[in-house]
Image (cartoon, rainbow, N blue to C red):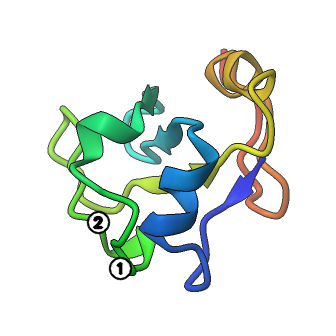
Amino acid sequence: MRLCDQSDTCRVLYARGLPLGISCPRCSRRILLKVGLLGIHEHDHRPVIRLPLLCRCGAIDVQRVILESPDEGDMFLDGRSVEGSGMARTA
């Protein structure tokens, strides 16, 4: 798993079929959003980092995490760190 960057498009996320990890630096909440809930489609070329996402606590600066395999979803939700993010395990 890794933090989303400018080169990650909605089209690629859609093609992978894996959920998008969302982590809030303010309240430490972590969730997985299925592609269908994001309102994206196979011809959507927007960068994933531009998707308008909001945490329940009101934070708009949520981190978007790209999962590389289906097994990483549980690891992400368990609070394991994301490559290159400095995000540490939360208790």
Q: Position of residue 45 (x, y in %)?
A: 39, 80
- Asked where in the image residue 51 lies, by quadrant, the reply is bottom left
Q: Which mark is residue 6?
A: none
- Between 16 and 72, the one lying in front of the other is 16
Q: Residue, x 35% and y 79% (percent of image)?
A: 46
> Which numbered disc, 1 or 2, marks the residue that appears first in the sequence?
1
Question: Is residue 17 depicted above or below 52 in this figure?
Answer: above
| Kind of residue at badge 1 | Arg
- Between 15 and 76, the one lying in front of the other is 15
Question: Is residue 78 depicted above or below 25 in this figure?
Answer: above
Question: Is residue 49 depicted above or below 82 in this figure?
Answer: below
Q: Residue furthest front?
A: 43
Label 2 crowd (10 A; few <14 / some 14-19 / many >=20): some
Q: Residue furthest bottom?
A: 6
Q: Give the residue pinned by disc 2.
A: 51
| Kind of residue at badge 2 | Leu
Q: Position of residue 64 (x, y in %)?
A: 50, 55
Q: Give the residue pinned by disc 1.
A: 46
CB under 8 Å between callouts 1 and 2?
A: yes
- Asked where in the image residue 13 lies, by quadrant, the reply is bottom right
Q: CA distance from mark 1 to mark 2?
A: 8 Å
**41 left or right of 58?**
right
* The C terminus sits in image quarter: top right
Q: Residue, x 70% and y 15% (percent of image)?
A: 74
Q: Residue, x 32% and y 57% (percent of image)?
A: 41
Q: Secondary structure at mark 1?
A: loop
- Between 44 and 7, the one lying in front of the other is 44
**54 left or right of 29?**
left
- Between 30 and 90, the one lying in front of the other is 30
Q: Secondary structure at mark 2?
A: loop
Nearer the viewer's eye, disc 1 or disc 2?
1
Q: Position of residue 23 (x, y in %)?
A: 49, 41
